[in-house]
Each structure stands twice: as structure tokens, then as C-alpha cells.
Image (cartoon, rainbow, N blue to C red):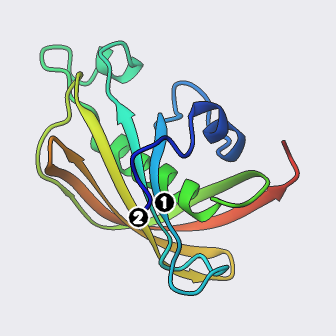
């Protein structure tokens, strides 16, 4: 996997994903790898980063005594990184709509100050339905993993 430098910064990410603050949950992409049969997307992998900060709106209520990033947002983070993998070479915006989540496991709380290392692979692709397998690490420890099935739709030339 090509890693080290920033492959996609926030400006490029915003050209691919339709999300905006406060729901854009990826800060940068630092690694990407094609699958075994390009241009097919199956097997494509991505390594993205999200820096968790205290000023994110969900921390005001989840939970006020001990700030924890909600598990549903960790799943959304995996889905957004998967969207970046899926639409890696497309021109324009693409969107994923989550259809199901399988095998979600939350192993450790995510708190302000954590840097999320998000690793996602497009494991299946069939017409507009895709399956993403992903996990998130903080300081080398897995904090979340899940398989996300989603509908994928691109809007070529929308940017």
C-alpha cells in the first residue's frame, strides 16, 4: 500500500464525498492500494486519518461526564473511508448509503485527542451494492471493526 505522504487532503475529500461539517469524518488519506483486477474496485484498500477533537458537537451530549465518540459515528467513519476507496479515481461526487452493518465490534472507547487510523477494503462489488470491511486503530490498538453493506452512486462531473 502506498503510504507516507498525504494522497488526499480535506479539499480533495470534499470533492469526492457529499458530507459537510459536522458529518465529514475523514481528515486525510495517507494510503491507497488497487485491488487485484483494476479497474474493478473489489480489493481496493485505503488508509485514512481522523483526528478526534473535543470541540466536535457530539461530545456535548455523549457523555458530558466522560466524552466518548459514539459507536455509530465510528461506523460512519468506516463507511466514509470506504466511499473514498470506492470513488478513488472518479471525477465528481459519490455517495454511499448504508444498507446494513454486520459484525460491528467496539473494543475500546474513542476519546478527544485520539487519532483514528481507518483501514477499509472494498470486499465485494455487485452493480450498485458494495461491501466494505474495515477497522479503526488508535495507537496501534484496534478500537472498532465492522462490515458495511452500502448502495453506491456516483455523480460524474459534479465538481
Residue 83 spot, x, y in % from top left: 56, 57
Residue drawn where x is 14% and y is 38% of the image: 109
- In the image, taking residue 139 as reference, residue 120 lies left or right, namely right
Q: Which residue is mark 2?
A: 1
Q: Which mark is residue 32?
A: 1
The image quarter in which residue 100 lies? bottom left
Of label 2 and label 1, which has the lower sequence position? 2
Residue drawn where x is 28% and y is 44% of the image: 71
Q: Is residue 77 above or below residue 9?
A: below
Residue drawn where x is 39% and y is 19% of the image: 56
Q: Which element is circle 2 on?
A: loop
Between 96 and 43, the residue placed more toward the observer is 43
Between 69 and 139, the residue placed more toward the observer is 139
Q: Is residue 100 above or below residue 42?
A: above
Residue drawn where x is 84% and y is 42% of the image: 159
- In the image, taking residue 80 as reference, residue 156 lies left or right, namely right
Contact between marks 2 and 1 (CB within 8 A): the answer is yes
Between 29 and 16, the residue placed more toward the observer is 29
Q: Is residue 101 above or below residue 11?
A: below
Residue 73 spot, x, y in % from top left: 37, 41
Query: Callout 2: few (<14), some (14-19), or many (20+) C-alpha neighbours within 10 Å?
Result: few
Between 122 and 151, the residue placed more toward the observer is 122
Residue 61 spot, x, y in % from top left: 29, 19
Q: Which element is circle 1 on?
A: strand
Q: In what quadrant of the picture does the N terminus appear?
A: bottom left
Q: Is residue 92 above or below residue 21?
A: below
Please count the marks in the image.
Answer: 2
The image quarter in which residue 85 lies? bottom right
Residue 20 spot, x, y in % from top left: 62, 30
Per the model, the C-alpha gap separating discs 2 and 1 is 6 Å
Q: Which mark is residue 132?
A: none
Query: Callout 1: few (<14), some (14-19), or many (20+) C-alpha neighbours within 10 Å?
Result: many
Amino acid at each position: 500500500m502506498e503510504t507516507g505522504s498525504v494522497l488526499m487532503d480535506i479539499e480533495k475529500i470534499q470533492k469526492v464525498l457529499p458530507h459537510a461539517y459536522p458529518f465529514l469524518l475523514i481528515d486525510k488519506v495517507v494510503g491507497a492500494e488497487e485491488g487485484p483486477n483494476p479497474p474493478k474496485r473489489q480489493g481496493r484498500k485505503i488508509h485514512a486519518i481522523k483526528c478526534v477533537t473535543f470541540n466536535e458537537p457530539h461530545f456535548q451530549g455523549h457523555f458530558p461526564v466522560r466524552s466518548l465518540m459514539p459507536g455509530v459515528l465510528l461506523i460512519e467513519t468506516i463507511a466514509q473511508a470506504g466511499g473514498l476507496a470506492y470513488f478513488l479515481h472518479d471525477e465528481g461526487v459519490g455517495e454511499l448509503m448504508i444498507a446494513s452493518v454486520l459484525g460491528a465490534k467496539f473494543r475500546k472507547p474513542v476519546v478527544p485527542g485520539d487519532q483514528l487510523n481507518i483501514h477499509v477494503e472494498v470486499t465485494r462489488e455487485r452493480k450498485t451494492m458494495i461491501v466494505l470491511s474495515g477497522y479503526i486503530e488508535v495507537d496501534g490498538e484496534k478500537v472498532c471493526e465492522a462490515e458495511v453493506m452500502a448502495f453506491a452512486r456516483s455523480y460524474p462531473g459534479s465538481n
